[in-house]
Amino acid sequence: MANANDSSPAEKSCFQCHRPAAPGDGRCRYCILEVEASEAFWAVIVRHFPEAKYGDLSPWRTIRQVTANVDAIEEWVRNNATPQDGDDDEA
Ligand SMILES: [Zn+2]
């Protein structure tokens, strides 16, 4: 009998970077964080150039920036917010 309601769902991949997707989202946690962080980043740039009327950036530059940001977020989380051997040795 076919199991139409698979109890072990196949791991979905982030449509942007192919890391494992967050539950209920098509993106991974790093791509989700990147959107929020990028909004803060561009808010600073816009604040310094109030005369700017548009926020144009080439698609290639945008893709490269997002990719670099997501990679940096993943590395930062791995290095700083993931339990490491010996982390619980502190008294
Ligand atoms: Zn992703």
Image (tube, helix red, strand yellow):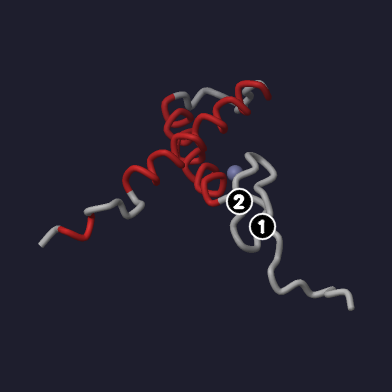
Residue 11 is labelled as: 1
Residue at the image point whose x is 51% and y is 40% from the top? 39
Quadrant occupied by the N terminus: bottom right
Q: Residues within 10 Å of mark 1 (few under 14, many from 20)?
A: few
Outermost residue to the bottom: 1
The picture places residue 43, in percent across and down from the top left corner, at 47, 36
Q: Is mark 1 within 8 Å of ligand 1?
A: no
Quadrant occupied by the C terminus: bottom left
- The amino acid pointed to by label 2 is Pro
**Count of numbered marks:** 2
The picture places residue 2, in percent across and down from the top left corner, at 88, 74
The numbered mark, 1 or 2, whose residue comes first in the sequence reads 1
- The amino acid pointed to by label 1 is Glu
Residue at the image point whose x is 55% and y is 49% from the top? 32
Given residues 4 and 46, the one toward you in this image is: 4
Given residues 81 and 31, the one toward you in this image is: 81
| Secondary structure of residue under mark 2 | loop
Q: Are marks 1 and 2 in contact (CB under 8 Å)?
A: yes
Q: Is residue 62 left or right of residue 78?
A: right
Residue at the image point whose x is 27% and y is 52% from the top? 85
| Residue, disc 2 | 20
Outermost residue to the left: 91
Outermost residue to the front: 1
The picture places residue 69, in percent across and down from the top left corner, at 49, 34
Distance between mark 1 and mark 2 Cα atoms: 7 Å
